[in-house]
Image (cartoon, rainbow, N blue to C red):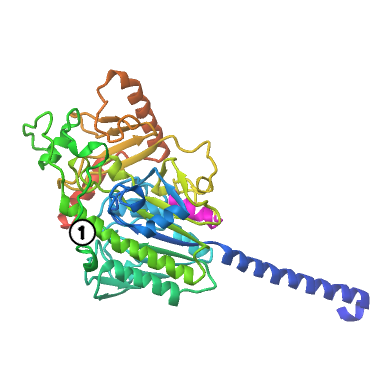
């Protein structure tokens, strides 16, 4: 009926319109696909317990050679003041994924039964996946100790991991829900799996996001057999600022108790200052950690070489960091957890030549909660409102952020009575000062001038000249606690510890 009523001219117009609209639809679909393909890939290499200065380019250890980490630093950006919000494995990893503080995502311990609320605080990889990315996680997750398919966290197309800390040699792994034992050294196993996924398993028509999260260099530090005899002819240099000479004079009583190895609630006579310890401290342990780093650097080099061969290197945002710092004899301590620089500060290197100038140095204070929004910003995706971090993209591009944060907030919740631990803490750090609140009624807090005393050796908390500074930092702390919705219910955290201890959970 229509064709009978319509004249030829109208029919031609109608057909041309139909062809034009069809062309628009095809072009729109093509543009959408092209836009997705042009988005950068992401490779996030995360090491466990790597001190911020245990890299070749820092020259802290003159004999330590890390050519691939050095390459990233030369070709990308080094973030000189990058901190974690809590210096312990599981909380930090959850913060990297969700962009939220531990008191928000809920993982404040290395507890075998706790994961973030993934529905409420989806990891950044879920958002990438929804935007057309193919995602993979290879390595340590260390949160709830699930088995089988339940071990696979949301937002990953491929999953290769293990329960808890795993083992350095001949580990049991979870490969997309299937558990089996593998022969070999963990760092090498993870590297091979990551490369196999890149070369054989992924969809070449999609951008990718790959997490390569290592077990190393966590204690017990067991290097690859090929590196066991490295550095035997070298001596460990003393820490900067002579922090190994710590006597704890003028510092909180709990630190002297901790150093003696006493539990918290034993009121034993402790001197006002301890004698200096002989250097080196924890020599074998620290040298083993550095030897473990050699396989990590080799792994990084192999993955970079793979990306280069595939033609994907220049279109991949490469991120290298650690889940927390580590004491290498500073303040006579080992492990991490506490609010000193060696514990809360971590290496962070990001390479992406298209937007980051080679050799960039960034001095602004940044946090692990900043990485998730930064990745989404790189991918030109909307940053969810629940993410508490800030995108670092403009800083990485060399642009100054006038309203960048004045101070960072660090938190810690007592997770064990082992000598490694400290009390519940929050710390506020500016470029010049750090205030540490230990929440102990009958003990003192800590205040350090980071410009004059970068080793944090002289506690100024009782200095009349610094009372105004202390008050200012306490006010900043209150502002940050309000901003980040800090949960002051420390008894709640303690109940989690008691529950974990009853289940014989190993906190590490």
| Label 1 packing within 10 angstroms: few (<14), some (14-19), many (20+) | some
Q: Main secondary structure of the magenta part?
A: helix
Asked if residue 264 shows in the view, the reply is no
- Location of residue 286 in the rendering, given as x and y in whole percent from the top left corner: 20, 52
Q: Residue furthest top?
A: 464
Give me the residue at 32% from left, 62% from top: 296
Q: Which residues are magenta?
A: 370-381
Instruction: Tell me the quarter of the image containing the C terminus.
Output: bottom left
User: How many discs mark residues in the rendered view?
Assistant: 1
- Location of residue 85 in the rendering, given as x and y in whole percent from the top left corner: 35, 45
Please name whichever residue, 9 or 268, is drawn nearer the observer in this view of the structure: 268
Residue 147 falls within the magenta-colored stretch = no
Please name whichever residue, 326 or 277, is drawn nearer the observer in this view of the structure: 277
In the picture, residue 184 is in which quadrant? bottom left
- Location of residue 160 in the rendering, given as x and y in whole percent from the top left corner: 34, 70
- Location of residue 127 in the rendering, given as x and y in whole percent from the top left corner: 49, 60
Q: Is residue 128 above or below residue 251?
A: below
**Mark 1: secondary structure:** loop
Q: Is residue 74 left or right of residue 399?
A: left
Q: Residue furthest front?
A: 233
Instruction: Tell me the quarter of the image containing the N terminus.
Output: bottom right
Q: Residue furthest left?
A: 269
Q: Is residue 83 left or right of residue 309?
A: left
In the picture, residue 35 is in which quadrant? bottom right
Asked if residue 408 shows in the view, the reply is yes
Give me the residue at 44% from left, 40% from top: 364
Q: Which residue is mark 1?
A: 221
């Amino acid at each position: 009926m229509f064709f009978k009523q319509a004249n030829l001219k109208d029919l031609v117009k109608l057909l041309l319109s139909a062809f034009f609209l069809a062309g628009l639809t095809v072009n729109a679909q093509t543009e959408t696909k092209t836009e997705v393909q042009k988005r950068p890939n992401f490779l996030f290499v995360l090491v466990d317990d790597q001190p911020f200065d245990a890299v070749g380019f820092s020259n802290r250890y003159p004999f330590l050679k890390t050519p691939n980490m050095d390459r990233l630093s030369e070709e990308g950006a080094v973030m000189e003041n990058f901190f974690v919000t809590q210096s312990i494995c599981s909380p930090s990893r959850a913060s990297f994924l969700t962009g939220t503080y531990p008191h928000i995502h809920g993982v404040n311990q290395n507890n075998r039964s706790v994961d973030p609320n993934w529905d409420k605080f989806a990891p950044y990889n879920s958002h990438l996946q929804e935007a057309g990315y193919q995602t993979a996680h290879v390595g340590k997750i260390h949160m709830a100790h699930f088995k089988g398919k339940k071990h696979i966290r949301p937002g990953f197309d491929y999953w290769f991991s293990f329960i808890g800390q795993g083992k350095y040699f001949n580990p049991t792994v979870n490969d997309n829900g299937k558990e089996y034992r593998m022969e070999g050294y963990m760092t090498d196993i993870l590297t091979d799996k990551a490369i196999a996924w890149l070369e054989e398993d992924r969809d070449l028509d999609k951008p990718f996001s790959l997490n390569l999260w290592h077990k190393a260099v966590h204690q017990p530090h067991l290097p690859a057999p090929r590196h066991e005899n490295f550095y035997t002819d070298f001596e460990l240099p003393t820490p900067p600022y002579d922090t190994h000479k710590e006597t704890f004079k003028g510092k909180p009583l709990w630190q002297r108790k901790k150093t003696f190895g006493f539990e918290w609630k034993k009121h034993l006579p402790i001197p006002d200052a301890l004698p200096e310890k002989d250097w080196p401290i924890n020599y074998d342990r620290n040298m083993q950690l550095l030897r473990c780093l050699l396989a990590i650097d080799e792994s990084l080099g192999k993955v970079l070489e793979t990306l280069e061969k595939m033609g994907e290197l220049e279109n991949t945002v490469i991120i290298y960091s650690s889940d927390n710092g580590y004491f290498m004899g500073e303040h006579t301590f080992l492990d991490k957890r506490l609010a000193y620089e060696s514990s809360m500060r971590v290496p962070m290197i990001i390479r992406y030549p298209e937007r980051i100038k080679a050799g960039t140095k960034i001095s602004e204070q940044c946090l692990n909660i900043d990485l998730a929004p930064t990745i989404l910003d790189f991918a030109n995706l909307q940053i969810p409102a629940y993410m508490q971090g800030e995108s670092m993209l403009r800083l990485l591009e060399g642009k100054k952020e006038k309203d960048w944060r004045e101070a960072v907030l660090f938190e810690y919740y007592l997770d064990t009575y082992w000598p490694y631990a400290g009390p519940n803490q929050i710390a506020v750090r500016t470029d010049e000062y750090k205030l540490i609140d230990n929440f102990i009624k009958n003990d003192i807090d800590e205040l350090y001038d980071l410009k004059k005393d970068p080793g944090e050796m002289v506690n100024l908390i009782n200095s009349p000249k610094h009372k105004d500074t202390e008050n200012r930092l306490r006010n900043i702390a209150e502002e940050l606690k309000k901003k980040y919705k800090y949960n002051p219910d420390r008894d709640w955290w303690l109940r989690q510890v008691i529950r974990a201890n009853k289940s014989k959970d190993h906190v590490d």
